[in-house]
């Protein structure tokens, strides 16, 4: 009897292993999509592997009772179009779909192209600074279908290069001299512009809690001053919108006029690590850093804005699809080059905005401006989905946002991921006003399933993000409900670490019961102020901000108000929020135009050291800390030892 039972058990185990093996679809950069998809005969692309899995589900293949694993072998999977995951790709709770990296391997989904054929530049090129002559390398810009690829980022051996700019030290940024809103003109010092070709010139302006990217249309030098005008649509938005706008500090109430820098001209290529793409000649120029051999270097530029899009419909959502151990890299963002970029806040760019001559709207009697915003893209976007997850993945070398849960999502998880070297926010979640929805209105959709809810964001490391759009965030949530942001570490951001809320309103909206707990935020506000480690907007009853550690805010000499920085900040309309047991080195907080029901209790340097020690990544995720880099430029840190609450 014992032997018979043992044989039965052994047979069951074998059958079980066979079923699991049959549900595995292997892919390799060296594979072929005509292959069977076994480990020994892998397919080549994730898209075709997904199609195979989709067909297995459609035909009710008996081998997938325990789910499907699409396993990526070592290597880079370069996309020619975004990977789209549809309702037909959905798994079930008992039989999910996993897209994962082979254990011990590194698999990357890339939206980039390689630039090869670099040669040392020998012939003279008009506009190239004398200091760069004999040091710059040149290559042909990549082309697709006969068209030159426009890009705003370039990486050499995985290290981000610098788009040629007028300053190499942010502390030495010049200030604008004046502006004329009616003529849509801005005046700067002529010394900021060396001789050169300004056909592709861009201006980046520091504007309180955001920046503006403006494409320069005309340059008119008049002695020591130069007058600039800009292309539409950014020109009228820049000069009409009141918040945040360029600072002209004629009465000396701020910290001087707005600083700025100029970029995207060969005339600025004067330092190792800088590059320039000439759209007229089809050439790319680069001055190598020490140790870079351009005859052997791997040079990548991003091409696709979106790498992965998970999207169903309100009636048929994508469900039970999970990513594990995958790297997402080299995604572009071209709006600043094509239409300019003037944000309202959190990187949400203005489509139109202006000051009201007669203040007041039906919803907000004292409102003195109106604004409509668009949303920057993310490398990976999720909407109309539920029970999805990203675990132990890496998001890097990205131009805009990393991962975005937009709307119609519930019961999802973002856990144990690394977000590093990202131009915008690492994580975005929730609605930030639809494009046709004025930004100050409370969000109360007719469909109660439209918002993002029950999203668990935990144990992620966010480091060196917002490195292009300084006004973006580490973790940015708009109108969300029942989300949990816990045990993340956020550092090296240009503005705020974690922000939850949108709308600037005390009115009831979908937000409630959000948790921001046990996070560690440090080395933030690298460039912009009116800032905090943790920031909230609008009514969100039942929301808890507890047991976080916030420390080490950068000192920025060029900020519009050098004292307007905080560790914790409940901004306009914030209501129903409990702020309790958060460790900060001083009680420097701001409660601005808050609504009712907020509770502040036991925050500051006397909070238990145990809370501080437990903040940030939990022990099983601290291996991610090997990726942390902070304050490589030795930027000073602000200290507020005995400042009181405001």
Image (cartoon, grey):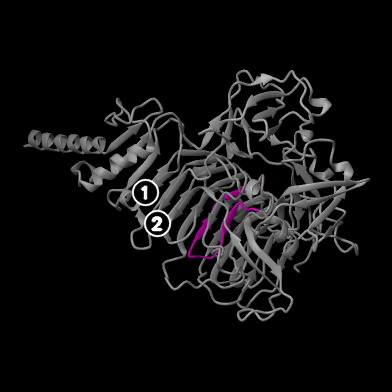
The quadrant of the image that shows the C terminus is: bottom right
Q: Which residue is mark 1?
A: 321
Mark 2 and mark 1 lie on one chain; the one further toward the N terminus is 1
Image quarter in which the N terminus is found: top left
Instruction: Give coordinates of residue 113: x percent, y percent.
Output: 54, 32
How far apart in space, not on screen, are marks 2 and 1 (Cα)? 9 Å
Residue 261 falls inside the magenta stretch: no
- Which of 530/368 is in front? 368
Residue at mark 2: 385
610 vs 412, left or right, is right
Specify whether 221 is left or right of 154: right
- Estimate the x, y position of residue 422 in percent, counting from the top left: 60, 43
Residue 278, given in percent of the width and then of the height, sits at 68, 33
* 10 Å crowding of disc 1: few (<14), some (14-19), many (20+): many
| Residue range (magenta) | 472-492
SS of the residue at dot 2?
strand
Relative to 264, does residue 426 appear above or below in the rendering?
below
Q: Does the magenta portion include 480?
A: yes
Answer yes or no: is residue 327 visible. yes
**Mark identifier at residue 114:** none
Is the residue marked by circle 2 packed among few (<14), some (14-19), or many (20+) residues within 10 Å?
A: many
């Amino acid at each position: 009897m014992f032997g018979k039972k043992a044989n039965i058990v052994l047979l069951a185990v074998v059958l079980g292993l066979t079923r699991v093996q049959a549900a595995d679809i292997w892919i390799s950069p060296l594979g072929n999509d005509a292959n069977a998809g076994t480990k020994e005969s892998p397919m080549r692309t994730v898209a075709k592997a997904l199609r195979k899995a989709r067909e297995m589900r459609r035909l009710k293949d008996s081998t997938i009772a325990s789910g499907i694993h699409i396993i990526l072998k070592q290597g880079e999977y370069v996309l020619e179009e975004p990977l789209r995951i549809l309702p037909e790709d959905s798994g079930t709770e008992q039989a999910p779909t996993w897209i994962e990296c082979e254990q011990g391997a590194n698999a990357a989904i890339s939206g980039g192209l390689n630039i090869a054929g670099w040669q040392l530049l020998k012939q003279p090129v008009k506009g190239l600074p004398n200091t760069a002559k004999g040091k710059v390398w040149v290559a042909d810009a990549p082309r697709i279908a006969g068209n030159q690829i426009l890009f705003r980022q370039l990486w050499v051996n995985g290290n981000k290069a610098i788009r040629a700019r007028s300053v190499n030290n942010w502390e030495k940024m010049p200030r604008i001299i004046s502006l004329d809103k009616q003529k849509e003109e801005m005046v700067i010092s002529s010394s900021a512009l060396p001789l050169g070709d300004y056909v592709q010139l861009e201006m980046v302006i520091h504007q309180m809690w955001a920046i503006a990217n403006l494409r320069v249309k005309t340059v008119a030098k008049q002695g020591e001053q130069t007058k600039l005008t800009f292309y539409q649509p950014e020109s009228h938005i820049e000069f009409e919108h009141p918040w945040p706008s360029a600072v002209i500090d004629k009465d000396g109430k701020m910290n001087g006029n707005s600083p700025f820098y100029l970029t995207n001209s060969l005339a600025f290529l004067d330092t190792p690590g800088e590059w320039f793409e000439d759209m007229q000649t089809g050439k790319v120029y680069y001055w190598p850093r020490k140790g870079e051999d351009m005859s052997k270097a791997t040079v990548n530029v991003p091409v696709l804005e979106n790498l992965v899009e998970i999207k169903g419909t309100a009636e048929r959502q994508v469900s039970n699809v999970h990513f594990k151990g995958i790297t997402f890299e080299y995604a572009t963002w071209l709006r600043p080059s094509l239409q300019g970029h003037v944000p309202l806040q959190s990187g949400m760019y203005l489509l139109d905005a202006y000051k009201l001559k007669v203040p007041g709207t039906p919803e907000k009697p004292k409102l003195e401006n109106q604004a409509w915003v668009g949303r920057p893209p993310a490398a990976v976007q999720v909407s109309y989905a539920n029970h999805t997850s990203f675990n132990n993945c890496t998001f890097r070398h990205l131009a805009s946002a990393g991962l975005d849960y937009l709307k119609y999502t519930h019961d999802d998880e973002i856990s144990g991921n690394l977000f590093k070297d990202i131009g915008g926010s690492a994580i975005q979640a929730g609605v930030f006003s639809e494009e046709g929805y004025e930004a100050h209105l409370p969000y109360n959709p007719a469909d109660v399933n439209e918002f993002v809810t029950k999203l668990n964001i935990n144990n992620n490391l966010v480091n060196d993000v917002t490195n292009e759009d300084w006004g973006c965030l580490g973790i940015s949530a708009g109108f969300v409900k029942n989300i949990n942001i816990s045990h993340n570490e956020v550092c090296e951001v240009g503005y705020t670490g974690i922000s939850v809320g949108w709308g600037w309103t005390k009115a009831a909206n979908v937000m409630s019961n959000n948790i921001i707990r046990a996070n560690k935020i440090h080395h933030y506000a690298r460039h912009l102020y009116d800032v905090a480690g943790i920031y909230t907007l609008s009514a969100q009853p039942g929301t808890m901000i507890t047991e976080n550690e916030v420390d080490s805010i950068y000192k920025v000499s060029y900020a519009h108000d050098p004292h307007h920085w905080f560790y914790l900040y409940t901004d306009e309309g914030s209501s129903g929020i409990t702020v309790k047991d958060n460790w900060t080195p001083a009680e420097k907080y701001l409660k601005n135009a808050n609504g009712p029901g907020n509770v502040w209790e036991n925050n500051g340097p006397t909070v238990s050291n145990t809370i501080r020690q437990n903040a940030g990544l939990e022990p099983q995720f601290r291996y991610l800390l090997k990726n942390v880099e902070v304050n490589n430029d030795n930027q000073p840190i602000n200290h507020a030892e005995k400042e009181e609450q405001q």
